[in-house]
Amino acid sequence: MKMQFPGMVTEAVADAVSGNWVDRFAPEWLKPYARLARWDRPIGWWLLMWPCWWSAALAAEAAGYMLPNIWHLVLFMIGAIAMRGAGCTYNDIVDRNYDGMVERTRSRPIPSGQVSTVQAVIFMILQALAGLVVLLQFNTYTIVLGFCSLVVVAIYPFMKRITYWPQSVLGLAFNWGALVGWSAVFGHLSWAPVALYAGGILWTIGYDTIYAHQDKEDDALIGVKSTARLFGGWTETAVSFLYIGATAFFVLAATLADAGPLAFLGLAVGAIHFIWQIIVLDIDDNDQCLKLFRSNRIYGWIVFTGFVVDGLIANF
């Protein structure tokens, strides 16, 4: 089994943020594992966390609280980092042969030989256990609900082999927190988090379609499917409809949660951010596609701020 030792030089991943903390500060033995977990690319856990935080904020407002439960927000952040890392490690294990044939992913730790498959499996289990510890802090309903998400997570890496809509399965997995954030407060679900979940799925298909345009040529050569390949030159139109649908479901969720005007103002500002993405999108500019994909962290802040400020004022 291949091992990494202090002092060994490891290869940076092609699509990591320049000057990230992993490349600058992590010891050499930790770097390949940090890259497996995508600690050098935090946008993934932000996108996994936002539905949790949005739901927690809407639930707090519906329950008459001034602010969402801070402890829950901390747990959701830790859980998002752990489970995003476990999910990415699992994805890299499943896709290890495909990744070696794609320019952007061939430098990942497994195909580049920095980490063995066995080591990756062990690391995945450790991250999943950290996520389990977080999940066990919630009520029984939420624990069961959290476990149900594992079915979707397990099948996601295989979807790109059989459907042009793998982004829809990613949406099902990445937005599960829209359900969990609500159930953590109430111990059950209602239509508001379901609407939030539906909107999140459309949002994810939109931003991940933009992201997938970076790989469309390599994907076509090796037979990997995606909405980027499906939509092609119609991507701007398709993503526009996806973002319109996402905004409509988010408005419905806020309405069902009895949110006030500032929540809707936040969604309106978020819609402007969506419009900006569509206007400047160039599907043949890989750097810009990555930039626009990452900009959805800002969208998350916009929506969350609107929900929190509205709840703060409404319940002051």
Image (cartoon, rainbow, N blue to C red):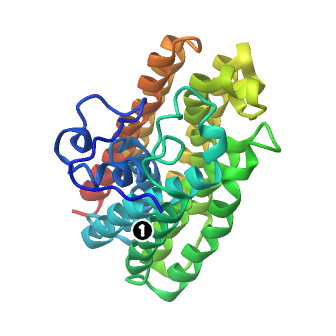
Name the residue furthest bottom: 140
Q: Is residue 152 visible?
A: yes
Q: Is residue 196 visible?
A: no
**Based on the displayed image, in which of its 4 quarters is residue 302 positioned?**
top left
- Looking at numbered disc 1 in the image, what kind of residue is underneath it? Gln
Position of 10 with respect to 275 (left or right) is: left
Residue 116, position in %: x, y? 50, 56
To which residue does mark 1 refer? 127
Q: Nearer the viewer, residue 96 or 48?
A: 96
Residue 200, position in %: x, y? 57, 48
Position of 153 with respect to 183 (left or right) is: right
Q: Residue at x 44, y 46 (%)?
A: 44
Q: Residue at x 47, y 78 (%)?
A: 186
Name the residue furthest right: 162
The answer to whether residue 86 is above or below residue 101 is below
Q: Residue at x 27, y 64 (%)?
A: 67
Q: Residue at x 70, y 28 (%)?
A: 219
Position of 107 with respect to 170 (left or right) is: left
**Based on the displayed image, in which of its 4 quarters is residue 129 positioned?**
bottom left
